[in-house]
Image (spheres, helix red, strand yellow):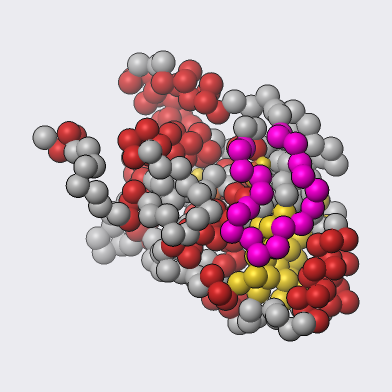
Amino acid sequence: MQELRDLAKKLLLDKQVNAILGYEWDRRGARPAFITEAGDCDRLVFDHRCVQNLAAYLSPRRANIAQLGRLAVVIKACDARAVAGLIRENQLKREDLVLIGVRCGGVVVNPSDSEQLNAENIAPRCVGCEQREPTLADHLVGETQSAPVGKANRDLRLSEIEKLNPEERLSLWTSLLSQCTRCYACRQVCPMCFCERCIADKTQPAWIESSPHSRGNFSWHLTRALHLAGRCVDCGECERACPAGIPLGLLNHKVARIVASRYGYAVSDDPSRETPIGSYRLDDEQEFIA
Ligand code: SF4
Ligand code: SF4
Ligand code: SF4
């Protein structure tokens, strides 16, 4: 923690950045913090309760953040994938940021969950996470962390769903998605949802029905999942923000598995790596068109 605070102080005192975007404690756990004074850097913290993906503040939808000037941002490896995605899609310039990578041993589902990280409360995406140190970072702080363990197993859950017949799968997802109230918290919190005007908000023509019933809900979720194919960084923020408890991570994970098997692509924190959705290859399979 002291290493992080000392580095943040130095960056501000040397005028390398105008503000640090990191985490601080609040009564419910950790929350995002914007620090502009070196004397406030002792507020900075990092541990398994720092669940938020701060890259969401770098999205062009948050134009007010750009007014702070040059930023240093604390990033976990999954957050770094979002920063890389924004750079790759020309929403950010790498040279405009200082990235403080933190070595991560997993986070809880909710910042208020517990002071201890354990197999029960760890976020499902952290179980089996292979990259826990961002390579995109300018600085790397914290001690090396061991691989997180937990009981959640998204691949097993997906395998169970895949064993259902099409009617049963439809019934399962109809039931899950029927709880969606179309509050769009999942979209607002997502670092990779940065369209100036979301297709779900368009009314002339209205591509997606806006009222929360099955037909519109299916359109919304399938459109969003496909728009994020090969772009979702698996930060878990949409699922955490959803007040209806819909397992959006399962849907995103399923799409990520399809992208991996069809295109051999896994989302990474290398901004120079093209995504399948933004590139064209002559040897792309297209048997589904025939
Ligand atoms: S997915 Fe990986 S890098 Fe992200 S919080 Fe979990 S363990 Fe850390
Ligand atoms: S869809 Fe969800 S998990 Fe994927 S990048 Fe957006 S907020 Fe993160
Ligand atoms: S956050 Fe949940 S309830 Fe709100 S629109 Fe997204 S899936 Fe639906």
Q: Is residue 66 above or below residue 190?
A: below
The residue lying at 55 percent from left, 28 percent from top is 154
The residue lying at 60 percent from left, 66 percent from top is 57
Q: Quadrant of residue 117?
A: top right
Q: Is residue 58 above or below residue 110?
A: below
The residue lying at 33 percent from left, 62 percent from top is 202
The percent coordinates of residue 278 (x first, y second) are 32, 56
Q: Is residue 201 left or right of residue 112?
A: left
Q: Quadrant of residue 106?
A: top right
Q: What secondary structure characterizes most of the magenta part?
A: loop
Q: What is the tally of numbered marks visible in this picture?
A: 0
Q: Is residue 286 left or right of residue 228?
A: left
Going by the picture, which residue comes out furthest to the left? 290
* 276 and 247: which is toward the camera: 276
The percent coordinates of residue 88 (x first, y second) are 44, 62
Q: Quadrant of residue 257?
A: top left
Task: Note whether residue 59 is visible.
Answer: yes
The residue lying at 41 percent from left, 31 percent from top is 174
The percent coordinates of residue 132 (x first, y second) are 66, 45
Q: Is residue 281 left or right of residue 213?
A: left
Q: Is residue 279 left or right of residue 266?
A: left
Q: Is residue 250 above or below residue 210?
A: above
Task: Note whether residue 214 is visible.
Answer: no
Let me know if residue 16 is in the magenta part: no
The percent coordinates of residue 73 (x first, y second) are 67, 66
Let me know if residue 138 is in the magenta part: yes
Quadrant that contains the N terminus: bottom right
Quadrant that contains the C terminus: top left
Span of residues in magenta: 129-148
